[in-house]
């Protein structure tokens, strides 16, 4: 059984559209700089707090270099849980 938006929506603190966009962008590994640009954010710390951290905590995205979260080569990729939620959001 897949995840439903009702299960994770309030925990994320993101809108349906924001979560869907984040998951779609993460289907190919993507840097925080590109994500910030796509969402129109300039403050990396606040973006990480609002978007990245909640999605990491719910295992919807994962770091490509988990041991170095602030590495300049760090990228984020959708997880299997993220794919299940995206499938639910695309219904």
Image (cartoon, rainbow, N blue to C red):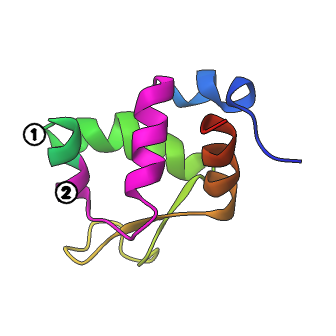
Up the image or down, 51 lies above or below 66; here it is above
Going from N to C along the chain, the mark reached first, 1 or 2, is: 2
Q: Residue at x 14, y 46 (%)?
A: 37
Which span is picked out in magenta?
Answer: 15-35
The residue at 19%/73% (across/down) is 72
Identity of the residue drawn at 46% across and 23% down: 15
Q: Is residue 35 above or below residue 18?
A: below
Q: Which mark is residue 42?
A: 1
Question: Label for residue 80?
Answer: none
Q: Quadrant of the C terminus?
A: top right
Q: Chief secondary structure of the magenta span?
A: helix
> Are the residues at dot 1 and dot 2 in contact (C-beta closer than 8 Å)?
no
Name which quarter of the figure residue 30 lies in. Answer: bottom left
Q: Position of residue 82 (x, y in %)?
A: 61, 53
| Image x and y of residue 25, in percent | 37, 55
Residue 13: image location, x then y, percent: 49, 24
Side (left or right) of 23 relative to 41: right
In whole angstroms, how far apart are the C-alphas of marks 1 and 2?
Answer: 11 Å
* Residue 79 in the image: above or below residue 87: below
Secondary structure, mark 2, is: helix
Q: Which mark is residue 34?
A: 2
Can you tell which quarter of the image residue 12 is in?
top right
Question: How crowded is the residue under tag 2: few (<14 C-alpha within 10 Å), some, or many (20+)?
Answer: few
Q: Answer with the quarter of the image where residue 47 lies.
A: top left
């Amino acid at each position: 059984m897949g995840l439903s938006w009702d299960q994770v929506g309030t925990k994320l603190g993101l809108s349906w559209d924001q979560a869907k966009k984040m998951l779609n962008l993460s289907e190919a590994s993507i840097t925080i700089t590109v994500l910030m640009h796509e969402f129109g954010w300039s403050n990396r710390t606040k973006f990480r707090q609002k978007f990245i951290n909640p999605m990491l905590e719910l295992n919807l995205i994962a770091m490509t270099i988990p041991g170095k979260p602030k590495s300049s080569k760090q990228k984020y990729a959708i997880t299997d849980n993220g794919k299940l939620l995206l499938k639910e959001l695309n219904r």
